[in-house]
């Protein structure tokens, strides 16, 4: 009996790990698609501000750095805003108008990634997650001693 429980627990852990890795793959795919749409569809990021001394916009290398900020899963993609977390000297010369454009892209990317998370776990949307959580909570309360 104990042996069967251990085997079931190992299977359960393996299934959970597989689900977690699958969710991570979906997250990376979503991030890639969003970066392609929101960052790389521009092809370039020139400064569009009149009279912004020293601002040249963002180079291709800078755009890669911005993308890597979100796709490098060692840091939380919902953590600090890029403007506060970045350390690349290229961004030191950006004018306020360019920062605002970049922050708009970042805001859209984060919002759309957040809205995509339920589908990574098999849910339609956040409302479906809430419904499932409510049902689980009710089952736990009913099953409590």
Image: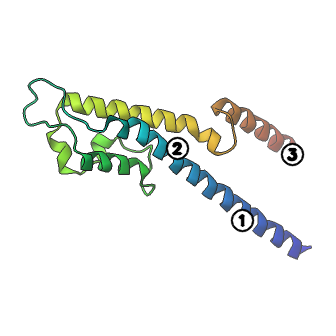
Question: Of label 1 and label 2, which has the lower sequence position?
Answer: 1
Q: CA distance from mark 2 to mark 3?
A: 37 Å
Residue at x 45% of width, y 55% of height: 73
- Dot 3: within a 10 Å radius of its alpha carbon, few (fewer than 14), some, or many (20 or more) residues? few
Residue holding disc 3 = 143
Of helix, strand and loop, which one carries label 3? helix
Q: Is residue 61 left or right of residue 11?
A: left
In the displayed structure, 97 sits above or below 39; it is: above
- The answer to whether the residue labelled 1 contacts the one labelled 2, judged by CB atoms less than 8 Å apart, is no
Residue holding disc 2 = 30
Nearest the viewer among 142 and 21 is 21
Kindly report which numbered mark, 2 or 3, lies closer to the viewer in this rendering: 2
Q: Is residue 79 visible?
A: yes
Of helix, strand and loop, which one carries label 2? helix
Q: Is residue 39 visible?
A: no
Location of residue 108 by image quarter: top left
Residue at x 48% of width, y 45% of height: 31
Residue holding disc 1 = 14
What percent of the width, then of the height, locates residue 88?
A: 22, 51
- The answer to whether the residue labelled 2 contacts the one labelled 3, judged by CB atoms less than 8 Å apart, is no
């Amino acid at each position: 009996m104990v042996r069967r429980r251990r085997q079931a627990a190992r299977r359960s852990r393996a299934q959970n790990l597989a689900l977690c890795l699958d969710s991570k793959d979906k997250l990376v795919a979503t991030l890639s698609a969003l970066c392609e749409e929101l960052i790389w569809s521009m092809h370039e990021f020139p400064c569009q501000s009149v009279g912004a001394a020293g601002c040249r916009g963002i180079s291709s290398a800078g755009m890669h750095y911005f993308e890597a900020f979100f796709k490098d899963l060692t840091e939380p993609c919902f953590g600090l805003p890029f403007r506060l977390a970045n350390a690349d000297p290229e961004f030191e010369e950006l004018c306020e108008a360019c920062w605002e454009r970049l922050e708009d892209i970042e805001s859209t990317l984060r919002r759309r990634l957040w809205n995509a998370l339920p589908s990574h776990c098999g849910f339609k949307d956040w409302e479906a997650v809430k419904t499932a959580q409510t049902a689980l909570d009710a089952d736990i309360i009913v099953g409590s001693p």
